[in-house]
Amino acid sequence: MKTAITIVMALVLATVSGCSSSSEKGGSVAKGEGFKIAVPTLTTELKQGETQNVTLSLERGAYFKQNVRFLIKTAKGISVDPTKVMVKASDKPDVQLRVTAAQNAALGEYSVSVRGIPKTGESTSTSFTVKVVSP
């Protein structure tokens, strides 16, 4: 019985913590003066010709008060709108992207890369996966 409870609790924790993945820290190396980019951990699945919204989040350190520019790139077959976003220091940290698979996109996995560039300090980048499946 203890083993079953332990397994269930481990699965719940893995599910709850598996919602997003963060990049390496960008900005300043001083504690609280950097940022990370959170993207979906799980693969986003799209049918050919389908569009879905995906949320990116800017995770700011307590003392990080800069604007951050996101540059988003992907491979041919899927598109992302917008491809450039400025998250101002006073803005909410979440950014909505529209990810679209072309009608004739090859089936398979595509990587979407996201780079965060602050006004000063180090940039950082991360990526998430989009899988195109047949309709």
Image: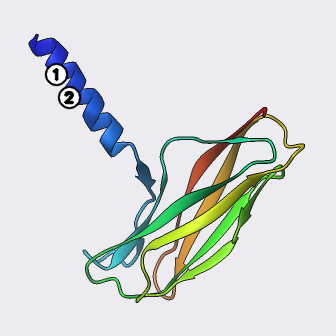
Dot 1 lies on which element?
Answer: helix
**Could you say where residue 47 lies in the image, as x and y percent from the top left?**
74, 40
Give the residue type at disc 1: Thr
* Vertical position of residue 77 compared to residue 73: above or below: above
Q: Distance between the residues labelled 1 and 2?
A: 5 Å
Residue placed at 43% from the left, 51% from the top? 21
Q: In the image shown, does 69 or 99 lie closer to the viewer?
A: 99
Give the residue type at disc 2: Met
Q: How crowded is mark 2: few (under 14 residues within 10 Å), some or many (20 or more)?
A: few
Question: Which label belongs to residue 9?
Answer: 2
Q: In the image shown, does 56 or 69 lie closer to the viewer?
A: 56
Q: Can you tell which quarter of the image residue 10 is in? A: top left
Q: Can you tell which quarter of the image residue 31 is in? A: bottom left
Q: In the rendered image, which quarter contains the N terminus?
A: top left
Q: Circle 1 is placed at which residue position? A: 6
Q: In the rendered image, which quarter contains the C terminus?
A: top right
In the picture, measured across the screen, residue 133 lies left or right of residue 115, that is right
**Could you say where residue 80 lies in the image, as x and y percent from the top left?**
72, 62
Residue placed at 78% from the left, 32% from the top? 134
Q: In the image shown, does 26 or 55 lie closer to the viewer?
A: 55
**Could you say where residue 69 lies in the image, as x and y percent from the top left?**
57, 80
* Vertical position of residue 71 compared to residue 64: above or below: above
Dot 2 lies on which element?
Answer: helix
Q: Do the residues labelled 1 and 2 touch (CB within 8 Å)?
A: yes
Q: Can you tell which quarter of the image residue 74 is in? A: bottom right
